[in-house]
Amino acid sequence: MIKDLLTEEPCGQHTVTRGWVRTKRTMKNLVFIEVYDGSCFAALQCTFDRTTELSIETQTTLDALSTGASVEISGKLVSSPAQGQCVELAADEARLIGAASGESYPLQKKGHSFEFLREIAHLRPRTATIGAVARIRSRLAYAVHTFFQEQGFQYVHTPIITTNDAEGTGAMFQITTLDLAKITAGTLDYSKDFFGKKAFLTVSGQLEGETYAAALSRIYTFGPTFRAENSNTSRHLAEFWMIEPEIAFAHLEDDMALAEKFIKYLFTDILDKHSDDLEFFDTHIEKGLIATLQSVADSRFTHITYTDAIRELEHHAANFEFKPFWGCDLQSEHEKFLTEQLAHGPVIVTDYPKEIKAFYMKTNSDGKTVRAMDVLVPRLGEIIGGSEREDDLEQLQLRMRELGMDIPSYWWYLDLRRFGSVPHAGFGLGFERLVQYVTGMANIRDVIPYPRAAGQAEF
Ligand code: ATP
Ligand code: MN
C-alpha cells in the first residue's frame, strides 16, 4: 500500500504500486501521474521519462490514462526533489487496469461542493476530503472498541427491532409486514402483524444495555439507531451509530470519570495515528482543529451543577438571544459560553431538572433534579449525555406513572430493580457527532458513507 511506501527509506528498490489516478501532467518528455490507493492521505507521484526505453503497453497506457482510471505502475522508489513529499516513483512500467471513460467521469476537477458530492456518494470516497473522513471514522471506531475492551467492558449487540414505543426520545420508524395497500382506514390489526404487535426500529440500545450491565458489570453497545427526525439540520440523521457504555456498581461520579477518560483517549489516539488527515482538515476545513483536539485531550474537565450553570448564565444574560432561566434546556449559545468563556475547556454539567431529562434517571433528594450529566466541549457543545439510572423500583414506577407511561410493557426493565438491583450509570455518544467534531466537517451527512435523512435514501 502507498502508506507503507511513503514511510520507507528510498534507496532505489524496485516497487509495484496499484491505485487510481488523481492527476496526470505532462512536461516536455516527463509524465507525472499522481496515484492514490486510499491507505493514507498522500498520493504517490510516479514520474515517467519518455526519452528512456518504454514498452509499447506502457506508452499506450500513458497516452490513455485519465483521472479516475485504475493502474498498476512499477519503478524505483527514490527520494523526491519536489516540495511536500519525500519519496516518489521513478517509474518505467504502467499497465491500465480499468479506464475511467474520459469526459464523463464526474470527479474530473477539484473543488466540487459537498452538496454535489452527496449526489455521487458512491464515488465521493475517492475525493481527498471524504477519503480522509472515512479513514478517521474507521480509526475512531477501532479506538472505541480498544478503549472499552482494555477497560474490561464486554461488547453487547442490542436489538435493532423493538416493541417499546415509549422510550421518549423522539419519532420512531414503524416496521410492519402488513400489506399497507390492502388496509383501509380503521382496519389495522397489529395482532396479525409479524411480531403480533406494533414494532419499531430502535432509537437507543440503553435499556437492553442496562440488563447486560446487571449481569456482566461493564458493557458497551455500538450499533445503528434510527430516528424519524424531520428536522433537516446539519446535526441530525435518520440512521446513525451510537455508543452506549453502562457500568454497574457505579454512581454519577464514576460515569463522569469514564466519559472524560474516553474522550481524551479517542482524541489522543486520533492525533497520534492520523496526523496527516487531521492536518488536511485543519488547513482546509476548520482552522485550529488540531489545537482544539489537543487542548481537550490535555485538559481537566470542569464540573458544574445545572443550577450553578444557570446562575452564571443569568449573570451574563445580556449575551444571549435565548434568556436562560432555571428549568430551561441549555441552548447552543449557553453551552458555548460555559466552555469557551467560563471554563476555557470542556465542562460537565450535572443535576438537571427532571422535567427536561429521561424517565430512567435517578432522582436527587431534592425531588426536583436528576443525576444527569452532559459533557460539553468547546466549539460544539454537548458531545455526551449520560446519567446514573434510577435503581429503586418504587421511585422508578412513580416517575413512570407521572409521565403516563405504559408500565406493564416495561416489566423486564423493572425486573432489574426487583432482583439484585445495583446502582448503575452510563452515557450515550452519537458516533457521527464525534466524527464531525474530530474532522470539523460542517454537515453530518458528510461523515457517514450513505446518509439517511428525510427524503434521502439513495444508494
Ligand atoms: P439532540 O438534542 O442533538 O437532538 P438528543 O438529546 O435527541 O440530541 P439523545 O437522545 O441524548 O440525543 O441521544 C444520544 C446522542 O445521540 C446525542 O448526544 C447525539 O450525539 C446523538 N444523536 C441524537 N440524535 C441524533 C441524530 N438524529 N443524528 C445523529 N446523532 C444523533
Ligand atoms: Mn433529538
Image (cartoon, rainbow, N blue to C red):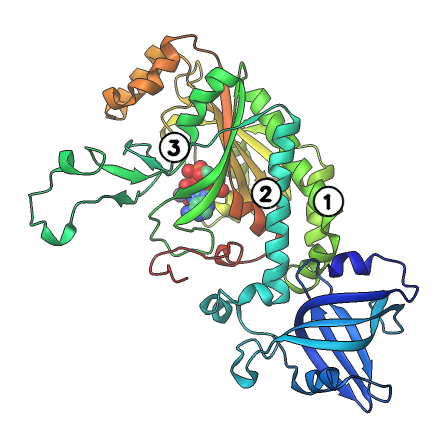
**Viewer-nearest of labels 3 and 1?**
1
Q: Report crowding for label 1: few under 14, some 14 to 19, many 20 or more residues within 10 A (C-alpha).
A: some
Q: Is residue 4 above or below residue 93?
A: above
Q: Quadrant of residue 89?
A: bottom right
Q: Report crowding for label 3: few under 14, some 14 to 19, many 20 or more residues within 10 A (C-alpha).
A: few
Left or right for 173, reference 294 = left
CB at disc 3 and ligand 1 closer than 8 Å: no
| Nearer the observer, 84 or 259 | 84
Left or right for 74, reference 361 = right
Q: Which residue is mark 3?
A: 356
Instruction: Please report whichever mark, 3 or 2, sits nearer to the chain's N-terminal start.
Output: 2
Q: Is residue 398 above or below residue 85?
A: above
- The furthest residue to the front: 56
Residue 8 horizontal/vertical position (percent): 85, 57
Query: Which kind of residue does numbered mark 2 sit on?
Result: Ala
Residue 26 horizontal/vertical position (percent): 76, 87
Residue 141's tag is: 2
Q: Residue at x 64, y 32 (%)?
A: 147
| Nearer the observer, 355 or 39 | 39
The C terminus lies in which quarter of the figure? bottom left
Q: Residue at x 53, y 71 (%)?
A: 113
Q: Which residue is mark 1?
A: 294
Determine the CA span between mark 1 and mark 2: 19 Å
Query: Which kind of residue does numbered mark 1 sit on?
Result: Gln
Displayed-image quarter of ligand 1: top left
Residue 124's tag is: none
The N terminus lies in which quarter of the figure? bottom right
**Viewer-nearest of labels 3 and 2?**
2
Residue 407 horizontal/vertical position (percent): 25, 21
| Nearer the observer, 74 or 452 | 74
